[in-house]
Amino acid sequence: MGAYAFSRNLTVDTLREILLNRGVSPDMINNIIDEAWNNVVKGYSGGWFATVVVISFGSTSIGLVHYVYNSTLPLRYLSKFSKITSRRILLELVVGSLVALLISFLILFTVCTAMFSHRFDKLILPENPLGLALASIVYGLLIYLLSMTLGLTAVVLRKPGLITKISYIPFTLSMALSLLSVYVGGEVYHYTPFVSAMSLLFYYSANIKPPYDKPLAYSGSDFTPVEPLHAWIVQVLWITLFTLTSLILLKKQKGIPAEEILAT
Amino acid sequence: MPISLHNVYSGYSRGSYILKDINMEISSNTIVLGPNGSGKTTLFRTIIGITPTVKGEVKIDDLDLETIRGSPGLISTNLREVYIQYVASAWELASLYLDLQGGDFGRFNDLVRFFNIARDLDKKPYKLSTGTQTLLYDLIALSTNARYVLLDEPFESVDPAKRVLLLKEIINYRGTVLLNTHTTWLLKQMSEWNVYLMVRGHVYGVISVNELVSSRISLSRGLDTLLELKLEDKSIYLNKVNGIPLSELDSLDKLYEVITWQ
């Protein structure tokens, strides 16, 4: 939809018209049109890709929350009566979840690259593939830790009936906040884990710093850009918070009887 | 003592305990017999540590349950809540757990073919019929070569023909089996086992299967009383001579009916 339906009016001619309306002379337009169009294509494709990844990982979290919740009893049993330690089990859960998210990322990357490249008639690849990969892995880890926090919260609250509603929180928030950031804008969104991830994914895709105080879809140049370091700090702080919360909840969940976890 | 529980209270929920003041010593094959809802499953969950003990202590081979870590081959169970469901197939689940617990996959394979459920195990565990699921977890537990095997209602929904075969496998298991059930048909085959009776979160016993099979249930205490079982507002007594023969009950679920109609 992003590649074809929403970009119907996005053409070189439209760009020329916009530049003319902003008072840029026709000669200047001729000089800069190729570079300007290149930036528009990169920015548009990068914005869509970043949004889709953020929302997709949020939807994967639905299953992860259930997975964490349903793993608490096997974890208690296996840590006592098998050769595997609870640390190893948790590590395997993290690695397994990251692998699943990575596969999701690769599929999205392939589809987006193919569709946007076809739409704009040129091969569109990320400007910084390593940065993009790292940002995706870190966001994937954040999503896992958020899922773990939510799954364990349902255990500790002794509310198995809430698990489905709780599992939709990351998906709902990722969708709402990312779209608000794209179309409405605002500084506060950049302090959320979803929009800070989106900023990094956008930056490493397009090599353009997204706006801090304007919507991502803003076409002007008068905005304060998001510094990548700022977005990284936000991501790390959220990861730290969810890690600490998960560790506390892991300890607390040991006191919850199996009957409370299994009740429907 | 191999498995011991002293003054154990567990399964605390909404102001009450499911298990109250449990005292048990299990050193040989033992049956825990009780009607549905008596706390038998919670007892097993407490022994394996997935339901925490609020008061008292549980020890296995003189080790406090709280301190046990990384001990494959000590205990196995057929409780399905300890099995991870996110696997590709039941075969994969069995392979994973037997590997982690130092079990014998070859033995599991032999048992599966003996019980003729090999083809079913290509499915995911939760897609199996109830009886096949029960059999799957029973066979995994019996293939771990664990010192103690805890079997919770191992015959539930299992095909009657397979029940008898399963009972033979359980009786011939080399380690110590702790089995809970509400049915009484199997008692005659397990004459050398010990029995605890469980009613409303309390445990009574231990007596031998022979004593139990020949005992009678009555509302009156007598000189021949073996055990007193406390139920709500009355007590029932297990006597040697006076009362209804226990062997006339197919299942201890009928215990309440018998007492009510007396």
Image (cartoon, helix red, strand yellow):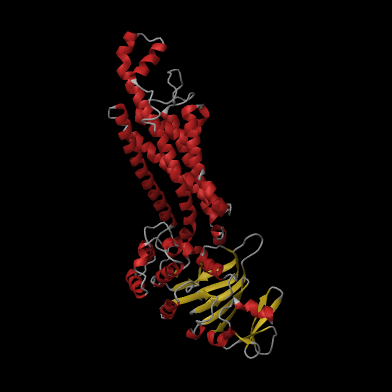
Q: Quadrant of residue B109?
A: bottom left
Residue B15 can be seen, yes or no: yes
Q: Is residue B90 above or below residue A3?
A: below
Name the residue: 45% across, 33% down. A196
Q: Residue A6 appears at what percent x and percent y? A: 40, 28
Extreme right residue here?
Answer: B233
Name the residue: 58% across, 53% down. A159
Q: In this view, does B106 lie above or below B247?
A: above
Left or right, A174 with reference to A19: right
Residue A190 can be seen, yes or no: no
Name the residue: 43% across, 45% down. A60
Left or right, A95 with reference to B222: left
Q: Which quadrant of the figure contains the C terminus of chain B? A: bottom right
Q: Residue B45 appears at what percent x and percent y? A: 53, 66
Q: Quadrant of residue B245?
A: bottom right
Q: Is residue B256 above or below residue A41?
A: below
Left or right, B139 with reference to B220: left
All told, the count of numbered labels is 0
Front residue of A17 and B104: A17
Front residue of A199 and A239: A199
Q: Residue B58 appears at what percent x and percent y? A: 54, 69
Left or right, B108 with reference to B241: left
Q: Is residue A196 above or below residue B67?
A: above
Q: Residue A173 appears at what percent x and percent y? A: 51, 38
